[in-house]
Amino acid sequence: MYPSAITLVVAAAAIGSFAWSVFGAFRSGERTTSGYDTLRLSAVTAWIIQLFILAQAGMAFDSPNYWGGNLLIVVGLLLFWHCVKVTRRRKLTLAFSVDAPEHIYQIGPYGYVRHPFYLSYLLAYFGMAIAANDVWLYLTAVVMYILYYHAARFEEEKFQKSHLAGHYAEYRRSTGMFLPKMRRFSNRRC
């Protein structure tokens, strides 16, 4: 099997999982802002660009980019499915929904970062860019980072205006938005 074919299969698994999540992992039916439409259109466009470029990319098994990029895609995919498992009983709403938050997850990946679903997407996007070492895929990943950052800020503002504001402020102090806070690890005892 060619290196690009392996990356294409792994990337397609990630993209397929992310697309499924709109109907299977998240609670739909809530009203959303135009931000959701922008994010959805951008994600679908990004997926088309990614699959098109990955299908044509000249990759080699001996390239560190190939292995590093594929590792990031797989880690993103594993993180995604772990998030699905954690939230399956009380599903989250879609990005940019205008509902009032009902609960705060602090278990599993949510014990380290506040937006692990978005982190899983970003790991896959940057993994695809690194594996193919393609400027268009890097640009796509950066654009998606900006959009997911805005989605995360929108959600955090909802928490700050909700009855969970105090608990969420405490949660924010102990976790990072997309990356764990280092003190979170240094306070753990082995």
Image (tube, rainbow, N blue to C red):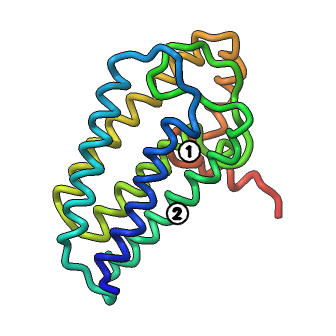
152 relative position to 103: left or right: left
In the picture of the structure, the residue carrying the numbered disc 2 is: 75
171 relative position to 10: left or right: right
Circle 1 packing at 10 Å, graded few (<14), some (14-19), many (20+), is many
User: Could you tell me which quadrant the N terminus lies in?
Assistant: bottom left
16 relative position to 62: left or right: right
Q: Secondary structure at mark 2?
A: helix
Are the residues flagged by discs 2 and 1 in contact, CB closer than 8 Å? Answer: no
Residue at 34% of width from left, 22% of height from top?
Answer: 35
Number of numbered tags placed on the structure image: 2
Outermost residue, right direction? Answer: 190
In the picture of the structure, the residue carrying the numbered disc 1 is: 116
Three-letter code, disc 1: Pro
In this view, 183 is above or below 98: below
Which of 47/189 is in front?
Answer: 47
Q: Secondary structure at mark 1?
A: helix
Three-letter code, disc 2: Val
Residue at 41% of width from left, 71% of height from top?
Answer: 70
In this view, 1 is above or below 162: below
Which of 11/146 is in front?
Answer: 11
Residue 101 in the image: state x and y as whole percent: 63, 18
Residue 102 in the image: state x and y as whole percent: 69, 19
In this view, 91 is above or below 137: above
